[in-house]
Each structure stands twice: as C-alpha cells, then as structure tokens.
Image: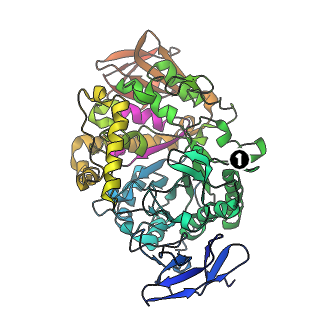
C-alpha cells in the first residue's frame, strides 16, 4: 500500500467503507491480505470515518484528532508539518529528574495546552526538570481526568488538539524542560470505545477491573500489540516526548513469551539511539515487584522507573495519622525507615489490606532513581472522598516536612500541581459523559466505594462525595494562582525552590545510592526522626512544640536549609514545633 493511504485493521470484516461526511459520500476500501483495508489519501483537515460491513460510521481507531468528540468523525492531521525549533534540545533522562505532574484542564483557568505554556516559566524557576501531563487521549465530553480515554492516538480537542501539544512540547524544550505523557494502554473508557467493532482488541481470556483484558497474547493479537507499540513510538517521534508514564501496567495481562512491555522497552531503546536523545518509560505498578525496572538481560521488563506508592503511604500516614483502607500497615517510624531504604514496605510479607503476601525485595544494586515518589499525586489526592489535599488538615510546617523528605530522598521526586505553594484547592474526580445514566452510575459507584473504606469516620461525619458530573466539581479543582500573592503560599514556594536548588548542589542528596540512606529515631518517642543521606541529615520535629533532636556524634552541623530557625548544638539540634532542617556534613575546627 502507498505510504500516504488511509488504512484500518478490520480482520473479520467483509467490507469496509471510507465515509466522507463533508462530501456526503462513501468510498469502498480495498482489502489487503493481512486483515487491513486501504483507501485513498485525504487532504489535511478532512473529516472522515469508517463503516464496517455497512454498519454505522465510526472514528478511526488511530485517529489523531477528534474535533467533533469521540462519537463523531475523525479529522486528518499531518504531524510532520510542525516546524520543531532547532534549539539543541538533547533530551532528559527521567531518572533523578524533579518531575511535576499536572492536569491540563485544571492547571489554568483556560484549561488548554497553550495556556499552560504561559506557566512554564514558573516551573522552570521552581527547578522542575520534567513536566508530566496527565492523559491527553480524547475522551467523552470536555471535562475528565483522562483515564477514560477512547481515542488513544488523538489529543483531546478541548485542550487544543494535536497541534497544541506539539507547541507545548517545543515551548517546554526551549526552557530546558522535558515532557512526559501519561498513557493508558490497560483499558479504554466506557463511552466512545468502538475498537471491538473493528477487531479483537479485547479478550475474555483475561479480566481487569474495567472488564475484558486487552488482547495481547491470543489470536490476532499481533496487530493489537502493534497498536500499543506504534502509539508509544508516535508520542516520542512525532510529538517530542521525553518519557511516557504507563498507567496500571499490572492490568496488562500478557502470557506471551515476551511481554508487550518488554517489547516496548526494547523498541524504545532502539528509538532512543535513532533519535539521539534519552527516552524513558515509567510504569505505574501495584505489584511491588522489582522486575519492572530490572533490565531485560536480568529477566526484567526494562522500565526506566516505576512509581513507588509505599513511600507516599509511609510518610502520609506518619504525619496525618490516617490508617484506613490500604493505609492499614503504615504509620510508624519503622515503616518509614523501610520505605526510605528498601523502597517497598511490602516486599513479600503480609499485606493486611489485601489479605495475602505481597511484593518482593528490591536488589541492593537497583538505585533509588528507578523509583518515583511523591507526597501528593493525582491518585493520592483525587481518589480521596472529597479530593482534599494534605493542606486541608496539615500545618505549613508539616507540609514543609513532607516536601523536605521527598525532595532530599534517594528517589526520583515528583510534585503535584500547586503542591509547591501549599495550594488549598482540592483535586476532585470529575467527568462529563454525554450519557446521563452513565454519569449517574459513576457517581453512585464512587459513593459506595468510599462508604466501604471508612471515609465517614476519617472526616468525622457523613461525607458528601462531590458529583463527578457537576461542572462545579471541575471548577473547584482548578488551581487558584492568585494564592501566590498570599505571604504564606509565597513562603512555601520559596522553600520548595530552595529544596530543589539544594538537591542540585549537594552530592549527598542528588545521589541515588540507597546504601548511604538511613534513619535514626526513638521507637518509644515517635515525635522526631532524622534521615541521613551520607553526610547530610534531614532533621524532623513532628511535635507541635519545640524540642532538641539528637544527632549521632558530637560535632556541629551546618544548617543548609530550614523551615524555621534551627539552632545546632553539639550532639543535636534544637527544633521549633512542626519543623524540618537540612544539615550539612559536620563542621571541622
């Protein structure tokens, strides 16, 4: 077939027609030997759809643009037409880079990629190195988190469409910022998913929380695997991405000899060589298995990094005192120590929440930068009953403690939009499904889920879970940048900037050597702890009142950064209530 022909995979179809709504006509496509159909090339900006066996016209499974919504026709888009600036961008490895997760729709009042460009200078000044965009694949309606995407090759039109994404990436690169894109390959959303009309993209041989699994290892699975592999390559090649964050890879069930993610890792490595810049794959996995980041030569999947939620859980529960749901096994200094040194709290022991042993130990040779950690992210904020941030209940000093522990850790740190100034806006779950019954069902389901996890007790009474379909839920989640004009928020921003700057200046902190990370604390007095990074110490006073915190040895330490005025003393340091200080190597006389 010609390189510019329009093609679609429909192996079980008898006929496939190219539908041109703007011209009021259809064109029969010719069958190829491999289950593909080919049709004529179309001019840039042409609306089109496909009809399988004279059925209803549906969008192209590989549509780049859905300006009429996910139920309407696709539109052609030439990704090669964009003139990428010759700015010498050499790329950025995601490992060890300070990442910043944002949701395009609520990051600014306008909710577009072009509007987000205007805030990139803020991120650059903060010290961010990689901007991670929550999913952009087109979904039903205008408002949503993006995890209900159904057109995986398209950029959501409400955000500006595919051309806007290219402009955003180019603008980020001009400022020295890498860009990561969150992609969802484990399922499609419930509204606008027409893949099964074209071919066996899903199989009942595997089940997931969202229904049938993706067909990665059954009959006709090769084109389905290619659908994923080609998609990933497209974001890297045509849109300049530096990293992809792969959502919930534990739901990609694949019994093939080579797992699709291992194949993706190999293909990404080859593409990195071809393009001459680092390309990173970051996995979200609930399994606590180090094989995710182990190299292919060691039998692993070869991901560059994976999210490590146990670090969040250990820190969050210690500071907030929350112990409900999946937090049951967290909340002590001993647990935080294990998370900070071993990464996985559950590494083969019993998970009380799951009721079974969970995880496996991380080999000592695996560096900390292979694990992305955070005090806030879209899941840990947005999947709370009312989408509240820690700033709802924590003091500014406690927020500073969280920031210091994460940003001086041996891991790859990530901030969630607004966290850097202690934003008070929630990040609630919102949808905009065109089917009202579906919207009602989603809302009812979330109320039932939170009731089973004991959220009423956590909030001290009955919880009114925000209606996901209500526009007010979305609007409440939009960042209020005007908060930066308030002194308390400006101070928090300055502290985050200083922490990130310190991370770049102090080798002890920048290192991913987990063997040089340790903790000291008193199990009988859980009001303080110290995280040691080689010769650097992060001293934390969890108590609301001032106290002296002991340090090993008798030598004074230099105060590199402190949230409140800290007084070094021989053998320790005097800390105000709810405070944190980063101390340098012992002073020599």
Residue of label 1: 255
Specify whether 389 is left or right of 240: left
Specify whether 320 is left or right of 226: left
Location of residue 486 in the rendering, given as x and y in whole percent from the top left corner: 21, 45
Residue depicted at 69% across the width and 32% down the height = 363
Find the magenta span and give its range.
Answer: 400-421
Secondary element at image label 1? loop
Above or below: residue 84 compared with residue 112:
below
Above or below: residue 320 compared with residue 571:
below
Above or below: residue 413 compared with residue 225:
above
Can residue 534 be seen at all in this image of the molecule?
A: no
In the rendered image, residue 455 lying in the magenta stretch gets the answer no
Specify whether 236 is left or right of 45: right
In the rendered image, residue 414 lying in the magenta stretch gets the answer yes
Location of residue 179 in the rendering, given as x and y in whole percent from the top left corner: 50, 58
Front residue of this view, candidates 179 and 257:
257
Location of residue 134 in the rendering, given as x and y in whole percent from the top left corner: 44, 54
Can residue 30 be seen at all in this image of the molecule?
A: yes
Residue depicted at 71% across the width and 47% down the height = 255
């Amino acid at each position: 077939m010609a390189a510019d022909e329009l093609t679609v995979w429909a192996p079980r179809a008898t006929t496939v027609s190219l539908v041109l709504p703007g011209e009021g006509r259809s064109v029969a496509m010719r069958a190829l030997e491999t289950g593909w159909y080919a049709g004529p090339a179309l001019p840039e900006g042409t609306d089109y759809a496909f009809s399988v066996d004279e059925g209803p016209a549906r969008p192209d499974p590989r549509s780049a643009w859905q300006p009429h919504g996910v139920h309407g026709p696709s539109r052609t888009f030439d990704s090669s037409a964009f003139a990428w600036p010759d700015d010498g961008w050499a790329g950025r490895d995601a490992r060890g880079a300070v990442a910043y997760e944002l949701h395009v729709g609520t990051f600014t009042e306008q909710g577009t990629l072009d509007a987000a460009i205007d805030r990139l200078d803020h991120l650059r000044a903060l010290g961010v190195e990689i901007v991670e965009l929550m999913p952009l694949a087109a979904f039903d309606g205008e408002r949503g988190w993006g995890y209900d995407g159904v057109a995986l090759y398209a950029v959501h039109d409400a955000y500006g469409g595919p051309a806007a994404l290219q402009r955003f990436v180019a603008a980020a690169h001009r400022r020295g910022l890498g860009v990561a894109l969150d992609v969802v390959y484990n399922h499609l959303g419930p509204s606008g998913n027409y893949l099964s009309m074209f071919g066996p993209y899903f199989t009942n041989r595997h089940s997931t929380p969202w229904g049938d699994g993706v067909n990665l290892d059954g009959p006709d699975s090769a084109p389905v695997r290619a659908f994923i592999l080609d998609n990933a390559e497209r974001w890297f090649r045509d849109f300049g991405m530096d990293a992809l964050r792969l959502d919930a890879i534990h739901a990609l069930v694949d019994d093939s000899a080579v797992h699709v993610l291992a194949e993706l890792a190999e293909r990404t490595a080859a593409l990195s060589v071809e393009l001459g810049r680092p390309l990173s794959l970051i996995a979200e996995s609930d399994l606590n298995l180090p094989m995710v980041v182990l190299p292919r030569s060691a039998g692993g999947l070869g991901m560059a990094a994976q999210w490590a939620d146990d670090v969040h859980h250990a820190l969050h529960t210690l500071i907030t005192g929350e112990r409900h749901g999946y937090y049951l096994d967290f909340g002590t200094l001993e647990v935080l120590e294990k998370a900070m040194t071993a990464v996985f709290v559950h590494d083969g022991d019993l998970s009380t929440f799951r009721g079974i042993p969970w995880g496996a130990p991380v080999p000592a040779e695996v560096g900390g930068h292979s694990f992305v950690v955070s005090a806030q992210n879209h899941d840990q904020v947005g999947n709370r009953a009312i989408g509240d941030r820690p700033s709802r209940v924590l003091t500014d000093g406690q927020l500073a403690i969280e920031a210091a522990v994460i940003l001086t850790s041996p891991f790859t740190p990530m901030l969630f939009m607004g966290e850097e100034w202690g934003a008070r806006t929630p990040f609630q779950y919102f949808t905009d499904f065109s089917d009202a019954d579906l919207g009602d069902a989603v809302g009812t389901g979330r109320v039932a889920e939170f009731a089973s996890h004991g959220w009423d007790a956590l909030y001290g009474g009955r919880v009114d879970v925000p209606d996901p379909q209500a526009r007010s839920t979305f609007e409440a989640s939009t960042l209020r940048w005007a908060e930066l004009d308030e002194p308390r928020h400006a101070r928090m921003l300055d502290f985050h900037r200083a922490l990130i700057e310190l991370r770049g200046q102090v080798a002890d902190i920048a290192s991913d050597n987990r063997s040089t990370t340790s903790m000291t604390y008193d199990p009988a007095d859980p009001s303080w702890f110290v995280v040691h990074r080689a010769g650097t110490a992060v001293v934390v006073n969890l108590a609301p009142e001032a106290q002296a915190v002991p340090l090993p040895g008798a030598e004074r330490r230099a105060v590199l950064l402190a949230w409140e005025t800290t007084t070094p003393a021989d053998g320790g340091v005097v800390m105000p209530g709810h405070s944190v200080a980063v101390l340098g190597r012992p002073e020599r006389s």
